[in-house]
Image (cartoon, rainbow, N blue to C red):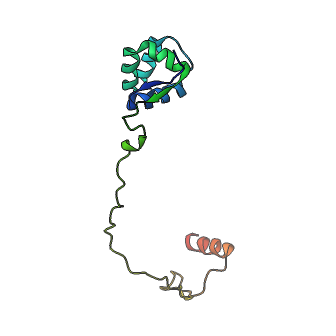
Amino acid sequence: MSREKIQVPGKAYEEIVALQREIHFTSDHEDTIKKAEDRGYMAAANWIRQNERAYKIGFAWGFEPVADEPSGMLRDIPEPRSPPVKRTVAKPMQTMEPRSQKKSGGSKSGSTKSSGGFFAGIKKWLGKYF
């Protein structure tokens, strides 16, 4: 028996390679089948169940995809779609106008001057209520 890689169908090959990356070496094929099913690798689990001896040899010597099946994963990738067209209405640019220095509307005390600060505000409040 020569040391040739074991040929596996395309989908099962992809799943077996992914499974080999995730688990450590195991010669217990029942445990491997359970782990493959838990991870959703159904094609690999079915192939291992049907080809126990070939799996054990292939785990040590390696696997290769069957030549008549494409082995690339690109067939599973959907075709790119163009981005959707934006259907928004552009709003006109509004600029902010500077505030006027003079306050609009008079204050209750009738003064048009701005308050003199913190203490002036307290004095105004005290005069209003006391």
Q: Quadrant of residue 10?
A: top left
| Furthest-left residue in this view | 87
Most foreground residue, 85 or 107? 85
Is residue 67 shown above or below 130? above
Q: Is residue 59 left or right of residue 41?
A: right
Measured as percent of width and height from the top left, residue 58 is found at 50, 20
Residue 84 location, quadrant: bottom left
In this rendered view, identify the residue nearer to me: 65 or 49.
65
Residue 110: give x, y in percent of width and height.
53, 86
Whole-percent x and y of residue 99?
Answer: 53, 85
Give the image location of residue 44, x and y in percent: 40, 24
Residue drawn at x 62%, y 80% as measured from the top left: 115
Count of marks, rendered view: 0
Q: Is residue 47 above or below residue 67?
A: above
Quadrant hosting residue 113: bottom right
Instruction: Tell me the quarter of the image containing the C terminus.
Output: bottom right
* Residue 21 versus residue 57 in the image, above or below: below
Q: Residue at x 56, y 18 (%)?
A: 25
* 127 relative to 58 in the view: left or right: right
